[in-house]
Image (cartoon, helix red, strand yellow):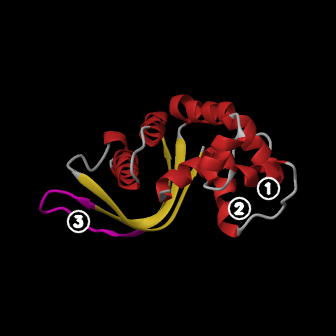
């Protein structure tokens, strides 16, 4: 997954009211309930149906590291869907989203103005409209590059142009060399 996509997912996961299952058996049982059968889980995790059944019965307790990672990722992706949806909805309608980043940010502006791209550390509260654009794009399967572009446009409008009060001739903000990126709802 992408840096931006993971960042958005992590922000939404902070809204969870209960922790996701930790043991391999509990995770496997959760997936079997969600996907309504061991065959679907086996196909999803690229293991045999018999292996899934053995995890469900706690006959196997410790998965290989690659399987453990896939299992964790699939459970987290499906955990508490209503709470996840509510957190996204709240960010997109009333709360907005906070982006905390340390990255090289530069911009394109008309000749005669400063065109500095430098590493900046920004913590900016983005209004709900930008949160909605980010979440909608993520739901539609946007690439990391597309999410990065949406975030750059949001930073241009909110941070560099201060909602239209300054830098009106600013054309484009570039968001590169990301050292740190975190979202908060």
Q: CA distance from mark 1 to mark 2?
A: 7 Å
Tags 1 and 2 in contact by the CB under 8 Å rule?
yes
Q: Which element carries disc 1, helix, strand or loop?
A: helix
Q: Which residue is mark 2?
A: 68
Tell me how far mark 3 sits from mark 1, CA to CA: 52 Å
Q: Residue 33: x percent and y percent?
A: 75, 36
Q: Nearer the viewer, residue 44 or 120?
A: 44
Q: Say which quarter of the image contains residue 95.
A: top right
Q: Nearer the viewer, mark 3 or mark 1?
A: 1
Ranked by sequence position, the earlier of labels 1 and 2 is: 1
Q: Is residue 46 in view from this perspective?
A: yes
Q: How many numbered callouts?
A: 3
Give the answer, above or below, for where 118 lies relative to 27. below
Left/right placement of residue 145 relative to residue 138 reads left
**Residue 13 at x, y = what percent?**
66, 46
Q: Which residue is mark 1?
A: 24
The stretch of residues the image draws in magenta is 107-120
What residue is shown with label 3?
115
Label 3: which secondary element: loop
User: Sequence order check: which comes first, mark 3 or mark 2?
Assistant: 2
Compared with 156, 81 (above or below) is above
Q: Position of residue 83 (x, y in %)?
A: 68, 33
């Amino acid at each position: 997954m992408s840096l931006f996509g993971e960042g958005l997912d992590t922000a939404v996961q902070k809204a969870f009211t209960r922790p996701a299952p930790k043991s391999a058996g509990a995770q496997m049982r959760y997936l079997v309930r969600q996907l309504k059968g061991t065959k679907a889980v086996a196909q999803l995790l690229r293991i045999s149906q018999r292996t899934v059944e053995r995890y469900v019965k706690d006959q196997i307790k410790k998965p290989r590291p690659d399987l453990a990672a896939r299992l964790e990722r699939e459970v987290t992706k499906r955990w508490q869907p209503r709470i996840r949806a509510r957190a996204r909805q709240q960010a997109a309608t009333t709360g907005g989203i906070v982006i905390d980043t340390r990255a090289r940010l530069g911009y394109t502006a008309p000749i005669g103005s400063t065109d500095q791209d430098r590493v900046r550390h920004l913590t900016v509260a983005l209004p709900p409209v930008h949160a909605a654009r980010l979440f909608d794009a993520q739901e539609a399967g946007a690439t990391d590059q597309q999410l990065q572009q949406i975030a750059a446009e949001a930073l241009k409008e909110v941070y560099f142009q201060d909602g239209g009060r300054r830098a009106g001739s600013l054309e484009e903000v570039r968001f590169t060399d990301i050292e740190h990126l975190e979202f908060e709802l």
